[in-house]
Structures are given as C-alpha cells and as structure tokens.
Amino acid sequence: MGLTSQSTGIGVLDSELKIERSRVDDKVIALAGNPNVGKSTVFNSLTGLNQHTGNWPGKTVTNAQGKYKHKDKSFIMVDLPGTYSLMANSVEEGVARDFICFGNPDATVIVTDATCLERNLNLVLQTLEITSNVVVCVNLLDEAKRKKISINLEELSNQLGVPVIGTSARSGRGLDALMDAVYEVTNQETANLPLQIAYDDTIEEAIRILEPAIQEQLKDKLNSRWIAIKLLDGDETLLEAIQKYLDYNLTSDENILQKISEAKEKICIAGIDHNMLRDKIVSHMVSIAETICSKSITFKNEKYNQTDRKIDAIVTSRIFGIPLMIGLLGVVFWLTITGANYPSEIIAKFLFWIEDQLTVFFTWLGTPSWVHGALVMGVYRTLAWVVSVMLPPMAIFFPLFTLLEDLGYLPRVAFNLDNFFKKSCAHGKQALTMCMGFGCNAAGIIGCRIIDSPRERLIAMITNNFVPCNGRFPTLIAIITMFFAGAVASPFQSLISTLLLTGVIVYGVFMTLIISKILSKTILKGLPSSFTLELPPYRKPQIARVIVRSVFDRTLFVLGRAISVAAPAGLIIWIMANIHIGDLSLLSHCAGFLNPFAKLIGLDGYILMAFILGFPANEIVVPIIIMSYMATGNIMELNSLDKLRELLVSHGWTWLTAVCTMLFSLMHWPCGTTCWTIKKESQSWKWTIVSFLIPTITGIVTCFFIANTVRLTGLI
Amino acid sequence: MNENIIPLNYLPLGKKAKVTALISEGTIRRRMLDLGLTNGTEIEALQRSPSGDPIAYHIRGAVIALRSEEASKIMVVAI
C-alpha cells in the first residue's frame, strides 16, 4: 500500500469490480500473483503509476488501476492483491478471485517469482481452471540468474498451454514482450489451450454429474467445471459472490442441489471425506506443479540461498536480533535528526526572507493591514513553518525507511516481534501494519486486511495509531530538534535526541502490545489465530529509484496534504488571534479554557488546542503551536531554530512540556482521514469510537502520570 | 504409526524432514496446503526468531515462518 493520494483517498476503499472503460475496445487486464513477486513493479513499469512497492508481502490490498497503450490499443491494468491461492481463505484472496471471475478481465497476467516458481505455479494452475485467457510472467529472472537457476520458458509455456514471458521488471527487461503477449491474447490472435487438470476418477465422475446442471444455469458466464469443483469442495464464499455479482442463487435451483448431493454421495462412497477431498485437489495441483517444474527448471547451485540465511542468522538471532533492530531504528533517526538541522534553518531563512519581500509588496500595494495580516502573517507564515520544519526530516527519513523496505528487512521485524504479539493474543502481521502506519495510519488501517481473523484485525486497527505516521513523525522530530538538539548542536546533543526519539517509538510499540493484550482480555476476547509469514529473499535496493519514489510518492504527497490543511488553519489562527473579546483575543480565550486540563497532563492550552485543530492533519500541530505563541507573544522575527526554542521557553516550556507534547502526539485521537478509514473498514461506529477513545485515554493517562510524577518528585 | 514421526516444531534447526500428515482442520489446514505442504513435501528448519518462536522453514523454495501452534500440527519424518 503506497502513500499516494490514490491509496489514502476515497478511491482506494472502493473495491467494486466495475472498471471504467473510456472506449469500448479498451482491454481490461487483471494482474495477479503471489505476494512479493514484483507485481507492483510490473504494474508501475507498464502504467507509470506510483503504486508503492516494497519487499514485503501484502503491499497491495485493494485493486489499483492504471492505463497503458500498446500498439493501437489501450489497456486498463488492475493490480490485484498478492495471494498464494484463489481459495478465498482471506479478504485478499476473495478480492483477487472475485475480480478474475466476475470483473470480466480480457486477460489475466500472473506474475511469478522465477526463484521459487514451483510454489507460484499453484496460483497459475488455479487461475487456469477459471479462465484460459492467461499470460504467465516469470519475473525476477535477473535474480534467478544470479542464483544460477535456469528456466526453460518455452517448455513451461508448452506445459501450461499459455504464453509464458520472462521479465526482470526492475530493469524493465521483457516488458515489451509481455505487452505483446497480452495484446495477442486479448485480440484473439492466439487461442490458448491451457493445461486441463484431471483429478482422479472419483472426483472426475462427481464433476461430470454436477457440471451440466451448472452449465445450464450459468451458461458461459463462468467456467462451469471450476464451479462444480468448488461446490463439491463446499466453497460458501463463491456462492455468496455469485449471488452478489451475478444476482443468481445457485442453491435455489432444485436440479443443482440434487446433483450436488448425488455427486457428493459418489465421493462419499469412495471413502473420501471433506478434508480428504480438499487435500486430494490441492495435492494434485502441487504434484502437477512439481512435474512441470522438474521439466523446465534446473538448479545449478543447490545452495543458492546461503547468503540470505547467513544474514538472517544475524538479524534474527537470539542475541542480536532485537538490539540490532532498535539500533537500526536509532541510526535512521540519528541520520534524520542530524541531517535535518541545517537544511531546516536554511529553508526557514529563505522562506522568511520571502515573507519580508511579501510584506514590502503588500505595503507597496497599499492594501489594508488586515489583508496583509491574514494572508502573510496567517496563511503564508504557517505554510513557511510547515515546509521548513517538516520537509528536511521527511526528505531524509523516508528514503532511509524505503531503503529498509526495499531490502526486505521489514518481514524480519515481524518475525522478531511475533512472539510478543502472540503473547498479546494478536497477529504477527500486526508488525507489518505498524510499519505501514509509519507511512500513514490510514494506509496502515487498510493494510490490516492482511490479517484474516476479524478479532485480530480490529486489534491491529485500534492500536495502529500508536505508531507515529508521516504527519506526527516530523512533529516529534521538530520538537526534538527545536528543544533538545537546537540549543547546542554538539554530537552529544544529537545522541540524546536520537535516544529520545527511539525511546518514544519503542514506547509506542510497547503500548501497542499492552493495549492489544488488554483488548484481547476484555472487549475482544480470543486466542491468537494461525500465522504464516513469508521471509522474502533480500534484494539489492535500487538507490536512485528509492530516492525518487520516497521523495515524490511520500514526501511531496505528505507535504502537499499538510500545506492544503495548513493554509486554512493558518488563516483561522490569525483570525482567532486578532478578534478580541474583552481584553483577550479569541485564541487566548480558547487556550485559557483548555489550559487547566492541559496543565494537568503537562501541556498548555495552546498545545492542546493545536492538537484539536490538527484533527484534519497532524502535520500542522507544531506550526499551529508556533503561530499561536507568536500571535500572543512579542517575538516577531523568527529565523533560526534557536529563536524557536526561546519562543517556546518564553511560553513556559520545560523539558517536561516537550516530553508530554511528544507523548501526546504519539497517543491521541487518530486524524480525520484515519477515523474515516476505520469507519469504512470496520463498518461500525462503535469500533470507530473505540479507536478514537483508546489512544486518547492512553495518552491522557500517560501524560498525567508522567507530568505529575515529575512535578511531585521535584524533578522540575 | 512410525516412531520417527514427530511434529514439525521438534525438528532440530538445520535438519530436513518430509511431511507425513497434517492434523489441523479448516482454515489452518487450507493455509498449510496453500504453502504446498502436502504429503512427502520436503521441509527444512532454518532459523528461530529471537524468542524461540516462530521458526522459519524452507518450504518449496520459499522461507516461511510458522508459530509452534501451527508447526505442531504438521507431522514429519526426519530425513
């Protein structure tokens, strides 16, 4: 799940199957594949869209679409969630299957991983049972070559009976051939004769009994042989899907019902129970995949995964695993904090120089002072703060984080942390949804779809907010740089800042686990469900692409959103600061009202108000705090971080205020988009309200406790 | 029953084994089958996580981590 407007906006939540064809002869292509085979890379290379890719399973959880042109035709490509099978055991599998079955794609491209083709073939074979318009794309050929795995694509194509194209999508190789193949398949130049999977005699007989009845009802809307197999297997979800998309209830047909029981009886008499039937079906496919692979793949080096194993032995070892993980986080933070300091100051100087020029310009225009005030002192100045405080840390942090993502380190994080989640009766993949939350909590919450159990999914959704997102992360860094690192920029200071930030994040993870545990023991009682996690091979990250992608996809997107929220917020702050009721401005009235409570939790009225105004987007919290202090104070010239610190101190900030603000930023209500996403995903107001209250209460309690302990013990 | 049949989570690290039976039911069973864990499939225990559980296994060319709960429902015979 990337962090683009597409993935965090309304569009992403809509997993309907309707595709808008702009012209009648536009071809719709479904892009399927196992998780983590470079599917999103293929998608991006073809469509030029910035579907965010990462080396970990489960990036795409909804259908993203993009267009490309090849020869004279337009193609609409739909990126389906990565799945191992189409059995609809999980939401993703359901989405993928439904699109292939009911979305009427003109062709389905299945992306497979050349380095573990055998397992990938399971999905290919299952898809071939549904449709014959399939193109198999064997991706990651470069990696396979490095591991000395050679694949006979022609043989593979002969075996499967559909076109097989080899690609290395990251370097763009083979994509033209892939587009050619798709073009041919969709234009019926070649009719595929896919491999027909023949089961054992008993099952085949049962299929023969059932298939004609289905064929009669559904005509050619779906592959009746496949439906027959699914009905024998007792796949309820397929019946529901047929009802939903074709508005047809198969089980209301007497004839079909009768044939089902007749066929099931046949199977029963042969001594095959339900589990055995499924085992037989799956084992059969697996053995076919094995045979196909043995004919088309040669391993020249049996120990091709040794390097990965050696790395894993270190990064997931008992002794080094967790310290290394926290250390790595620390290094990323240290680089971000130290690196962001100087650019922040330069940008601030530059933007405030522009502010001076604007002031000169407005004076020259002779506009009334309130126009200048509202536009320059309100809107422009807030924007300037947003950019100068947020841009540098984001531009450093995101590429670094994306790098870790690209390497394949994140699944190892989930692997390392899984036992903690198990002890909290939660799902190990929650660690992955938390990593998504680092990007954007709304995306993290959509990402919770990778967790199958509804109970564990809700836990992951409710606690996702304990990971600071894009918007809050710079808030934390800004406070640290202003308050702790800003004063003396010595190496020692940045070390303290790093420890502080790492501490806050680790505390967030800790709270996630505690709250998950509490939820599991109270309102979301239950035991942990099954858990399997793939640890993909490490991949050499493409540095240039990482930078471009994280700057454009993430940094600029987040900044853009921050700016669009900050502009009106700046205006509101300015107006509130300049409308006076009695002796005090509206701003002071509001802050005064909030102040007693805010003081209790170590904040002040302005800070709490900034958090409330920051509901639409957390990015603007720090700029609002600065703006409100400036509107009420007398320091008007701020052009360095030192001055910022002075401003905060002059408003009564101590290290305790900074710590409490950071903790409250980590733990308070989710932003508007996130709340809305939770409502959409959980389909329930109750859980949305719970997700709103739990982090808020946790934050208030924590801050109250810390503030008062520190005060009582006389540390301050 | 062969004496050498053990649940997968008892397979020592670095050792290989063949699957003899899945004793799980329902969704978990399906998950295991999706991973290609059918009878006779070769599987190798690779790496423990820092706290000892889950354990990463080499299954059909992929590295998959399984919790002891799941692994204990996969019966294997060491080879």
Image (cartoon, rainbow, N blue to C red):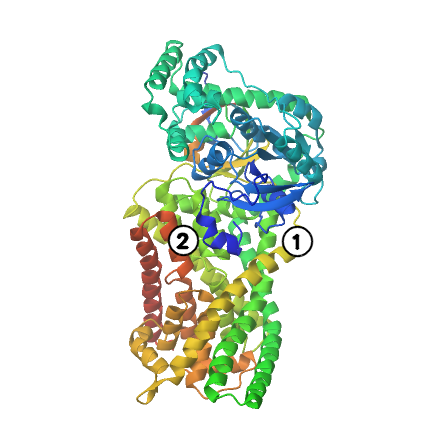
Labels 2, 1: one chain? yes
Considering only vertical position in the picture, is A444 above or below A295?
A: below
Q: Earlier in the sequence, mark 2 or mark 1?
A: 1
> What's the residue type where badge 1 is placed?
Arg
Residue A558 lies, with reference to residue A65, above or below; the image says below
**Residue visible at 50% across and 84% down?**
A372
Residue at 48%, 88% (x, y): give it. A368
Percent x, y for residue A212?
A: 44, 16
Which residue is under mark 1? A545
> In this rendering, does residue B60 appear at all?
no
Q: Quadrant of residue A30?
A: top right
Between A142 and A249, the residue placed more toward the observer is A249
Under mark 2, the amino acid is Thr
Q: In the image, is A526 to the left or to the right of A317?
A: left
Question: SS for tag 2?
Answer: helix
- The C terminus of chain B sits in image quarter: top right
Q: Nearer the viewer, residue A235 or A666?
A: A235
Circle on res. A677: 2
Distance between the alpha carbons at the discs numbered 2 and 1: 29 Å
Circle on res. A610:
none
